[in-house]
Amino acid sequence: MTALLAPDAPAPERFTDAVSAVDRLQQLYDGAVAFLCARFAEVMAQGAPEARIRAYYPEVRLTTTSHAQVDTRLSFGHVPSPGTYAATITRPDLFRNYLIQQIGLLLENHRVPVTIGLSDTPMPVHFAVSNDAAITVPQEGATDFILRDVFDVPDLNTTNDDIVNGTYAPPDGVGALAPFTAQRVDYSLARLAHYTATDPEHFQNHVLFTNYQFYVSEFEAFARAQLADPDSGYSSFVSTGNAEITDPAAPILSADKLPQMPSFHLKRPDGGGITLVNIGVGPSNAKTATDHIAVLRPHAWIMVGHCAGLRNTQALGDFVLAHAYLREDKVLDDDLPVWVPIPALAEIQVALQEAVAELTELEGYDLKRVMRTGTVATLDNRNWELREQSGPVQRLSQSRAIALDMESGTIAANGYRFRVPYGTLLCVSDKPLHGELKLPGMASDFYKTQVSRHLNIGIRAMERLRTMPLERLHSRKLRSFDETPFL
């Protein structure tokens, strides 16, 4: 099959206004999606055509020849050197505010127009038809023709993390404008809906991760209280199955079956609300969740879970503010070697510490009675304490670790990798090295007294971060030598 059926390709246009540029991206994207959806419906009704069917993602492109110095206090919004840079774009409707902001900074900093046109990256039919709930793509073999012989399907050459991992080799010398390609973003948007049972549109810019279901009911109670307050700034609460309420007394009709990582969203009209994701237990879940949420470019994510306290001076219910991580999770070793340091981010650390002080009504030296700052170890073995003591325990002691869990190091490392500000505030729920195991009766009392306060500390920290200017929150510590200008 050599013939190609594609929509007419309009000539690229140059823009000096970010809003107009994003409007054009939306037009090109909508045209490609409409074309693929219409042709797909025809093929399913009439059979395979004599030509291959293809449409392309839109792209934004910038060329600058000047070495003029820009305001480098900002960690994003400017290219590292003269040249041509481009990014394929998907879902301009979902990313509209983000794109206007990022393109606007390029226009302001470099004083040259951006070019909007079609890229040479085909749009997979799966991602195009996902915009229409009435259309589904059948499994391979369910039709009388081979799907990939007619339509483009996801391609691992453009669905990977080469850019964020620093292994991207620019084709024809064209650098990357954004940390993810359009296909990589589309892939994660589809995975998010699957794993969390909520659409990506509901995710907010501030994400809390937890490893216990107990936090969900507390989050819902907090959300209802905020919806009852007309001055809170929050507009709705979304549960699994995209069940959304604006009335604090309304029942929530959640999904019949909980997904692998149920997510809940306390929304604000500007996207500055809070999302809570119950990732469950284990570094694999932590990596999966953050791999996909990262494409939404949140402003911060924080782990608020339970941990094993490793010091005799700690008590059940004490807080642990991580300022370093011993990474033995293993799931990120190929993407981010363990020799890469994961620095604590001052803005997140201060917000968490101030939130603990506010909620406990302790400050200064007295705060040390309920919170300890130090290294958190993240392991991939839930029953690590059953191993011989000379191995794991010796390493924990040498690292000066004060707490251990199975998710925090992974979440922080992926935040570092994806340039998403991160932090960790854990709560000691057991002390296995000192004979205080997490047993049913003890755990019940612990959860009743500590979950609400712990969650509220995480929420309060996020509300503090929400008022922080982006140029301050998105630290230069997360940026490498030749960074993408898009955040």
Image (cartoon, grey):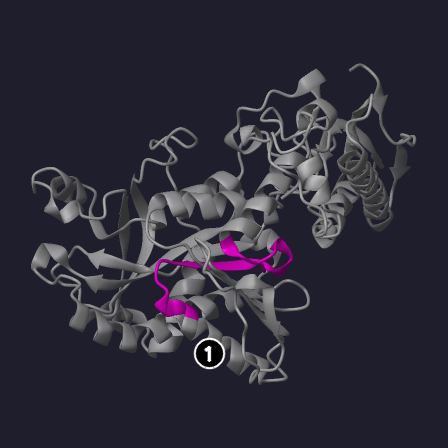
Magenta span: 196-216
Residue 210 in the magenta stretch? The answer is yes
Task: Decide: is 4 above or below 452.
Answer: above
In this orientation, which residue lies closer to the viewer: 73 or 387? 387
| Residue lying farthest to the top in this orientation | 2
The residue at which mark 1 appears reads as 221
In this orientation, which residue lies closer to the viewer: 309 or 321? 309
Q: Residues within 10 Å of mark 1 (few under 14, many from 20)?
A: few
Instruction: Using the rendered image of the protein, determine whether residue 181 is visible from the camera's viewpoint.
Output: no
Task: Decide: is 333 above or below 397.
Answer: above
In this orientation, which residue lies closer to the viewer: 11 or 106? 11
Residue 205 in the magenta stretch? The answer is yes
Three-letter residue code for mark 1: Ala
Q: Residue at x 92, y 32 (%)?
A: 10
Q: Does 18 sit left or right of 295 as displayed?
A: right
Element type where label 1 sits in the image: helix
Q: Residue at x 42, y 66 (%)?
A: 458
Instruction: Using the rendered image of the protein, determine whether residue 349 is visible from the camera's viewpoint.
Output: yes
Q: Residue at x 52, y 82 (%)?
A: 225
Q: Quadrant of residue 308?
A: bottom left
Which quadrant is home to the N terminus? top right
Q: Quadrant of residue 24?
A: top right
In this orientation, which residue lies closer to the viewer: 334 or 368? 334
Which quadrant is home to the C terminus? top right
Q: How many marks?
A: 1
Task: Decide: is 48 above or below 380.
Answer: above
- Where is residue 147 shown, x and y percent of the image? 68, 28
- Where is residue 35 shown, x and y percent of the image? 83, 38
Q: Does 389 sit left or right of 12 as displayed?
A: left
